[in-house]
Image: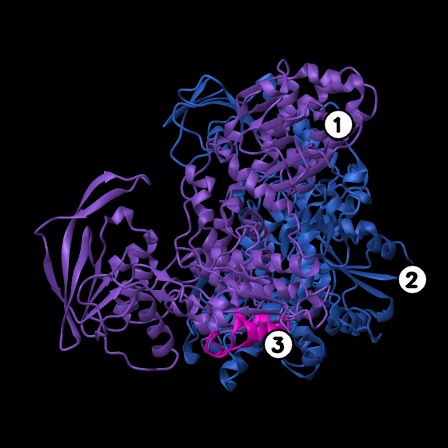
Chain colours: A purple, B blue
Amino acid sequence: MGTKVVIGAWGDRKFDNRGKRFFEIEEFEELGDFREFDPGNRIKAYLGGKGFFVFDKDVSLLCAIGQYMKRAADESCGKCTPCRSGTRILVGKLQDLCARNYRKGQLQEIRELAEHIHTSSLCGLGQSATVPLLKLLDEFPEKVEEELKNGSARGTQVMHSYVTAPCIEECPSKVDVPRYIDYIKDGKFTHSVGVVLQKYPMAATCGRVCVRFCEMACRRTQVDEPVGIKVLKRFVADQQKYASEHWFDRSLIPDPKPADLKVAVIGAGPAGISAAYHLLLKGYPVEVFEAMTQPGGMAAVGIPEYRLPKEDILRKEVAIIEDLGGTIHYNQRMGRDFTLNDLIDRGFKSVFLGVGAHKGKALGVPGEEGSVQGYITGVKFLLFINHYHINLGLDMDLGSKMVVVGGGNVAMDCVRSALRMGVKEVHLVYRRTRDEMPADMEEIEAAEHEGVIFHYLTHPTRLISKDGKVTGIELTKMEQGTPDASGRRRVMPVTGSEFTLDTDFVVPAIGQRVDQAFISPEQGVEFNSWGLIEANEQTLRTTRRGVFAGGDAVTGPATLIEAMAQGQQAAESIDDYLTHGRLVFRPERRFHQLLKGMRKLQSEEVEQPIRHLYRVKVDELDPETRKRKFEEVEKPISVEAAYKEANRCMRCYRVCSVVTEK
Amino acid sequence: MNAIINGRPVEFTEDTTILEAARAHGQFIPTLCELADIGHTPGTCRMCMVEVTAQGQDKPQLLTACDTPIEEGMVIRTRTPEVRQHQRLQMELLLADHNQDCASCVRHGDCELQDVAQFVGLQNTRFSDPEFFAGRCVDRTSPAIQRDMTKCVRCQRCIAVCRDVQGTDVLVFTGKGVRAEVGVRDSIAMKDSDCISCGQCTLVCPVGALAEKDDTERVIDYFYDPDIYTVIQIAPATRVALGEEFNMGYGSNVEGRLISAFQQLGADVVLDTNFTADLVIMEEGNELLQRVTDGGVLPMFTSCSPGWVNWLEKNHPERLPHLSTVKSPQQCFGAIAKTYLADKMQVDPARMRVISIMPCTAKKEEALRPEFTGASGIKGRPDVDVVLTTRECARLLKREGIWLPGLPEGRYDNEWMGEYSGAAEIFGTTGGVTEAAIRTLHFAVTGQELEGIDFLPIRGYENMREAEVDLGPKGKIKVGVAHGLAAAKTMIERVNNGEADYTFIEFMGCPGGCMGGGGQPRIKKNYQTFWHERQQAIYKIDSDAAIRQSHNNPHIQKIYKEFLGEPLGHKSHELLHTSYRDRKVQVKHDMKTIWDEIRS
C-alpha cells in the first residue's frame, strides 16, 4: 500500500503532481501507508531527515518546517556550535519570516544558515535538521513565495514529532540508545542507566545477554565496526547500584490506583517482570505468580551462569518489583496450584500470561519413544543444570561423551554448559552450514575455542539405546540444494551416508513449544495453530476479556528483549483496558509503523570520511580455565574504555514529523 | 601517503587528521576546541572547516580538519572564499550564545575566542542574544575556582583534563541546546563536590568560563589600610613563572623584581615561603625517622600539596594515617609569622595580614581550613589571610601600574625568616620535596652531608618514579614520587595491593608539581608545555644557592634555638602539625530525581 504524494522532495528525488487531479496521482509504493495517523485523522504532510512529502495541497510547508526546526532545536545536545545556536536562531528567523511581511534578503540569510548547519554539524541531528527547509527553498521556491504572499504560513498546524535513530527503531523495546551513550560521554552514568531503566528493570541482565538488534542497525558499521552498545549498557548497569541501593521506591508512583484494581502476572520471566514493572509504575497493585522457586523464567533456567550470574545480577534486578510494592509468589504453578478462574474469583481485574515456551521439541526419529535414559531436550537440560545442579546442588550423571543437536543459542548454551559440567567430549550436530547457524557468532566462536566438536550438514536419523540407556546416535550427511522461498538453501540427506556416533547422552536443542497444561480449554484462552497463545498483535489481548499475554508464549521462542518489549506493551494495554476500557492511541507506536513502512527510503550512507576507532575488546576468561567452570566469561570494561567506546557513537538522530488534520 | 594542501604536496602516515598534516607542513587552520597537547579533538566548535576533494570525486566537501582523517590523494584547500565565509558564520554562531561582556571578563585580552574571531576576520555579530545564555550556571561557591557558564564554548577541554589527566572526573556535560554547559557531577555546588581545587581546568579553558577566584581586591584593601601590617610570602614556583605574564622568557627568575614590586606596593615585610619549606623538611624528616623507629604507619605520604590532600580525604580516607602531620609550608608560614615573627618584630598579630603568592588554586581553599586558624590569638582568624595565584599576582601588579621587567632586583632583609636553602626552592618541582628531605635525612642519620648534594635518581618527568637511598646505619630505603592525580591514583592502588615497598612517597596534585600548578600562567593552546623551563630555573636557583640543605639554614637553626626548641617538640606540635578528615562525598541517588532530569 502506498500513498498519493502531491509534492515532495526526498534525497535526490523530486515529486510534483500539482498538475494532476487527486485521483490521477499514482500511489508512491515505497512510502507505505501514510493516509491516516490515528483512525479518522488524515496525514497532510510528512517531514524527515531526507526531505518532505505533502499529501494535501493546503498544507503550509513553511509553517510546518518552522515547527519541525523548533523540535530539532529542543533536541540539540548543545555540544557543536551550528546545531546548538544555529537551529535556535533559525527558529526565530522562520517565525519572523512567517509573522511579518516578507523582506528582501531575509530568505537569503535563512538559506545561508540552513546550509551552514547542514554542512557543518557534528552529528546526524544537526546535519538532517535543515534538510526539509533546504529542499523546499531549492526545489519549490515558488511555493515559498506563494505561502508568504497568501499568509498561509502565519497560522499553526497540528503536528506530531518524534525523534529517533536506526538503533532505536530496531530495538524491540525502543531504548533510546544514543541518549544513554550520550550520558556516558557526558560522564553521567546514573542518567545513562536511567534511560535504560525507563524501558525495563533488567538493565544489567540485558547488558549481558541481549542479541543486539541495535548493533545490527548501527551506522558505524559503515566506518569500521558497530558501537559496543550492549557492552556499554552492561558497563553503566554494573557501575550503578540501582538494585542494591534501592533507588526504586513508591515515591516513583505519581498516581496510585485503588487497591481493588489489582493485576495478576503469571510468570516471573522477562515478559512478566517487565509487565509487572510498568504496571507498578502506573500505580496498579501487582502480584506475580511464578512456578519455579526463583525468578527470571528462561533467563534464569535457560541462560547459563557463565553468561548471566543469577544471584548477583538477575535476582537483584527482579527485586526492584518488590521495591516498587509488588509481590512475587514462588512455587505457584498455574494449572496445578490455581486456575485463571480462581484469580478472577480472587478479585484480579486483569491477568497477564507470560508463561513462556518451556517444552522442548523431540528429534522425531525412531528410538526416542518411551523413556530413554540419557536423552532430554535442551531446555530441560539447561533447567537441570541451572536450577537443580547449581541452585539445589543435585548431582547429574552426564557420561563422558555428549551429542547436542541444533544450531541456535540454546544449542550453544547446552554444549558450553556440558563442558563446564565435566563432559569430556562434546559434539554438536547441525543440519546446515556454519554460516547459516542462527546462534550468535560470538557464541559459536566461544564454543569452538572451548573445544566443542562441530558436525555441519549432519542430521540425526535414529537414537540408539541399550537396556533403556542411550549408547549412540545414527546420523546422516546432508547436502545443499537450491534456495527456497526464504533464500535459504534446502538441505536433503545424502543416501547411504549414515554413520553412528557412540555417545552417553543426546540433547535435542531444536526448538521449544508452549506447555499448554497451564490452562484448560473452558477458561476461554485459545491457542493458534502454532500452539501459541492467540493474542492481538496491537493490544496483546487474548480471546478472554481482561486477559493479556506476551513473551515466548505468544511469539514462540524468541529473545529477552522481545519478551520485555511485549511485557511493556501488555502493561500499556492493561492500563488502557482498566482506565478507558479500550485501546488508547499512542503516537510513538504509530511512528514506528510509519517508519517501518518506509524503511527503504530511510537508509543512509555515511558520506564523510571518519576516523577509524576500533571497538572495545572485552576481556574474557581464558578458554582453558573457563570451560571447566561457570564463572562469568566476559569481564567488565574499564571507565576509560567506556568513555572511548561511547565516543564512537555517531548519534544518528533524526526528527520525524507529521502534519495532521486534527 | 600523499595529498595536496593548498596546492602543496604533503606526506603523512595512516591515522593522521587533516589538521595534524596541515600543521606538520606549516599550514595554519583556525581551531578553538581542540588541544593537541592532550590529544583532545571533540569536534564541537566546528571552526576548522576546510574544503576537501577526495580521490576520484569531482565535487568538494566542506569538512572539519580536526576529526577528518587525511586520505591518499585528497586535495585540500583551507582558504577558499567559501571556507572563510563558513568560518566567519561559525564564529557568529559561537558568539550568539556567548556572554560578550568582554571588558569585565577575567580573560580580557588573553582570550582564545577573541583570537579566533580575529583569525577568521569577523566583521559583525548578527545573532547575539542574551536570552541564549540567561539561566546558565554561575557558581562562585568554591574558594578556589569560579565557574561562569555564560562564557562556556563547550570545548570540553576542562572535562578532558579533569577526567583523563587528573582522573578526578568531577566535571560533566549537562543540559541541552543553548542551555548546555559544563556542570559538576550530581549537580552539587562546587564547594561540596568531589572537586579538589587543583585548578588544572582553569589552565585549559580558552575563555573566562573557568578561572581562579579573584582575590586581588582584598589585597589592595590591605595595602591601603594604615592599620594593617602586611606580610608577603612568595612560593618557590611562582618566581620562575610570573615573568611569562610580563613577556619575559620561560623560566625567567623574577624573585628580586617581585620583592621590589611588593616593597613598592608598601608591604611591611616581604618574605619567602622557602623559609618554612626548610622548616617542613626539619619536621617531616624527623617524623619519618620517628615512624621508621617506632613502627609507625608507612609509607609516609607528603602533605604539602593541598590538591593531593583534598583528593586523599575525599577518595581514600582510609589512607589518611599515611599523611605526614606537618602542615604545608604556606600554613607553617602563617602560623610562624603570627607568633614568632610578630613577637620578634613587636607587631600585634591581630593587625597582621599574611598574603601568599602561590602557583596553586587549592592553596586558597587550604588557607580556609578550620585547622589553620587562630595563631594570631583570634579564634577563627585564618593564619594565612589571602592567597593570590601567580596569575592574580600578575593582575595585581598590572592593576597597580607596576611593570615587572622594569624593576630593580630587591632582596629579603629580615633577620628571623629571611634566609632559605636551595633545598627549599626545589619544593616547587616534582621530586623536589623528596630530594630536600633526603639531603637532611642523610645528614641526620649519618652525620654527613649527601655526597654531591644533588640526588639525581629521583629527578625526571615520568609521572611515577622511584629511587633507593643509602642511609648508612639505618640501611637503604626506597622512596617514590607521583605527580598528577591520575598517577597518584595508580600509586595508591599499588599501595593497596602491597606493591609499593616505599618508606616515603611524595605526592603532588598537579602534573609537574607546582611547576604545572593550577594557578600558574596559562599559555594559549598549550597545556603543561613550559614547566620544564621553569624547572630548570628552579634547579639553577638551588645549585647557585650558598646554602643547599634545610638544616644548614641559619635562620632555621635560630628559630629552633630561640622559639621551637626541637623538631617534633611541643611548640612544633602546636604550630606546625595538623590532622586530616574523612571528606568522602556521599550522594544518595534515587530514580525519581534521575528520571525527572532525563525528562526535563
Mark 1 belongs to which amino acid?
A: Leu
Mark 2 belongs to which amino acid?
A: Asp
Residue at point 66%, 77% (across, down): B579
| Mark 3, secondary structure of its residue | loop
Mark 3 belongs to which amino acid?
A: Arg
Q: Nearer the viewer, mark 1 or mark 2?
A: 1
Q: Residue furthest left?
A: A496
Is residue A330 on the magenta stretch?
A: yes
Magenta residues span A317-345
Is residue A374 on the magenta stretch?
A: no
The numbered mark 2 sits on a residue in which chain? B
Q: Position of residue B309 (x, y in %)?
A: 62, 67
Q: Nearer the viewer, mark 2 or mark 3?
A: 3
The answer for how far apart the CA atoms under marks 1 and 2 are is 64 Å
Residue at point 82%, 45% (across, down): B400
Q: Quadrant of residue A52?
A: top right
Q: Residue furthest bottom?
A: B294
What residue does disc 1 label?
Answer: A94
Q: Position of residue A198 (x, y in %)?
A: 60, 57
| Mark 2, secondary structure of its residue | loop
Q: Nearer the viewer, mark 1 or mark 3?
A: 3
Judge the density around disc 2: few (<14), some (14-19), many (≥20) Cα neighbours within 10 Å. Answer: few
Going by the image, does B467 lie left or right of B205? left
Give whichever of discs 1 and 3 has the lower sequence position.
Answer: 1
The numbered mark 3 sits on a residue in which chain? A
What residue does disc 3 label?
Answer: A346
| Mark 1, secondary structure of its residue | helix
What residue does disc 2 label?
Answer: B227
Labels 1 & 2 near each other (Cβ < 8 A): no
